[in-house]
Amino acid sequence: MAFRILALSALVAKLSYAEPYNTFDGPGFPACNDAIAVHNPSTVDEMINLVRNAAANGTPVRASGKGHMWYDTMCSDNATVIIRTENVNKISDFSLEEGATDGSVMIEAGVTFFQIAEYLHERGASVGYTLVNWNITLAGSVAMGAHRSSLREDSMVAAGALELHVIDGNGDLKVIKRDNGDDEWLAASTSLGLLGVIARMKFKIYPDFKVYAEQKTLSEKEVLEGDIYGLIAPYATANLWWWPHMHKFHQRYYDRVPTNTSDQEGFQSTFSVTEVEAGAASALLNAGKYLATSNMLSENIFFDLWSKPNFREKTTNEEITEWPVYGWNYDVLIGGLYPGYGTEWDYGLRGLTLELAFPVTQANAVLNRVRKAFDDEFWQNGKYMTSTYRSGINIKFGKPYFDLLGQVTYDTADGADWNKGAMMFDFPTFKPSVGDGLRYNEPFYPKLAKTLIEEFPCRPHWTKNTREVFQWSKGNLDADHLARFKAVRQKFDPKGIFKSVVGEILELY
Ligand SMILES: Cc1cc2nc3c(=O)[nH]c(=O)nc-3n(C[C@H](O)[C@H](O)[C@H](O)COP(=O)(O)OP(=O)(O)OC[C@H]3O[C@@H](n4cnc5c(N)ncnc54)[C@H](O)[C@@H]3O)c2cc1C
Ligand SMILES: *[C@@H]1O[C@H](CO)[C@@H](O)[C@H](O)[C@H]1NC(C)=O
Ligand SMILES: *[C@@H]1O[C@H](CO)[C@@H](O)[C@H](O)[C@H]1NC(C)=O
Ligand SMILES: *[C@@H]1O[C@H](CO)[C@@H](O)[C@H](O)[C@H]1NC(C)=O
């Protein structure tokens, strides 16, 4: 009986008054400013009913996975109902024939990367390189055009979707199949959640395989004056991490190896920290709100730590100390948390970010422009620019993938050459938890974003930017793509119940 009451109250859990619905960073970091209810359904049918109710009342409604986004752009500012997908997480219809190069599986909205990875590994399969991070839903990633880093392989998560089953603005479940000749597909492929709730996806899978991870340290000159495309394109997945104070880069790359290459089972962790480590980092980084030397010291420490493999042997939990590292693809490419560790945000370390994509053909010009902005900040304002993030400034890449609103689409009216792919400048920074909470060089960040947007063709990541950045960059988007998207949006959601701040800024309402 007690159990039934609990289950029932979980299903209809409502907040009695409007309050923010937070991102993974918790209180003080709203994803939605005004959530009037948060529902936790456990089946697709329950989600359909919730959307039908919202549609009948004209109430704004948004789906949410794990809240792994940064700013208050999930909803519109009007009172919104949230449908949390966490408990709608069945995996079914596994199909991968002996000897086949690929197959498929059906997953529900709440399935996370680590959940699907474990399920598939047990069955000798994987999703290849269409990955983001561990505790994030695949549906939330497809909705927002999330991606890994590769110029050679498809690494937009959407590239793995074969069918999207979307609950539209009337509460009807529509099946949209991959078809590049169909605007419904091209809109659904990066929908920003504006067509409705992605309830299920038929997703492409491959036979499981092993990979190596290798990392090199490069001087800043080798990158800024080098062949950036050539550093990335040969590998299955690769990226750069920039240490601007040290004038260095790390180049990380991964590729497939025969299964018998090594018995090692490397397991990566980007975010694991102990409470003691987090406390030390927090003290140093908070001091950096006031003191440049503190930030420089942080960057030196982070650089040294990041030069070593951030991997352990999965079978023994022992630290791996030498490159290259070998293991099963998901464990090496993503991994998760080490046993007994927490994440940085579990221990109160908070971040802000900014991510813009540029044609990779302009990669050198963009990074040199950023370097100039860093130098100008010192010469004009006396402020030393550093990376205040444990893995530096993340420079990622994307193979071209055509849809209407994706970051790596092509054939756009800006006339820029997106056909070779994109470089993403992803600039995470520490957000102080002391004083007014502003960063040491707070005005620099929006100024840099504005400069890059004005001087280069570029596109924002849909969950890693502030409202201002969306405002500034919307003029860089293709007007025809926006118009075609809007036509599909009006068909799927005539009353605009799924609207979000992003959709409003893009004038899709
Ligand atoms: C630690 C960390 C690492 C990350 N790494 C990367 C990275 O490497 N590359 C990258 O591209 N991104 C990255 N991201 C961003 C992340 O992939 C996106 O923000 C993603 O959308 C989050 O998914 P979620 O399941 O947490 O959804 P939420 O954060 O809950 O929602 C994000 C948005 O998607 C919508 N949405 C969620 N589920 C659905 C659904 N079922 N149907 C329709 N709309 C939906 C929501 O309404 C909201 O607008 C990272 C984020 C974090 C916190
Ligand atoms: C995954 O994210 C959710 C929501 O942020 C959180 O409650 C949960 O503890 C996380 N799980 C892990 C393993 O970090
Ligand atoms: C939504 O919010 C806008 C701006 O605050 C307001 O003008 C509008 O009336 C609101 N609409 C509804 C339906 O509440
Ligand atoms: C791995 O297997 C292949 C094919 O069976 C074989 O040719 C190769 O020598 C093996 N390599 C190692 C390192 O054992």
Image (cartoon, rainbow, N blue to C red):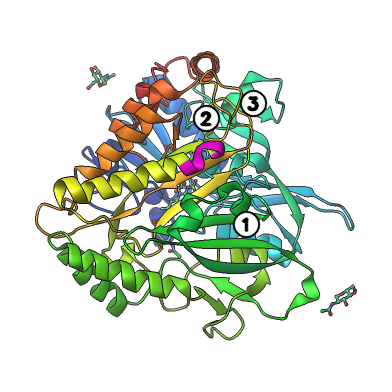
Residue range in magenta is 360-364
361 falls in the magenta region: yes
Left or right relative to 231: residue 278: left
Mark 1 residue type = Ile
Mark 2 residue type = Ser
Mark 2 = which residue? 191
Relative height, residue 75 to residue 110 (above, below): above
Examine the rendering and report whether any part of residue 354 can be seen.
Answer: no
Residue found at the far right of this picture:
99
Q: How far apart are marks 2 and 3 (CA)?
A: 9 Å
Secondary structure found at label 2: loop
Secondary structure found at label 1: helix
Residue 365 position by quadrant = top left
Mark 3 residue type = Trp
Which residue does the image show at 35% across and 27% down from the upper left? Answer: 454
Q: Residue 376 carries which label?
A: none
The CB of the residue at mark 2 lies under 8 Å from ligand 1: yes
Q: Residue 185 carries which label?
A: 3
Closer to the chain start, of discs 2 and 1, is: 1
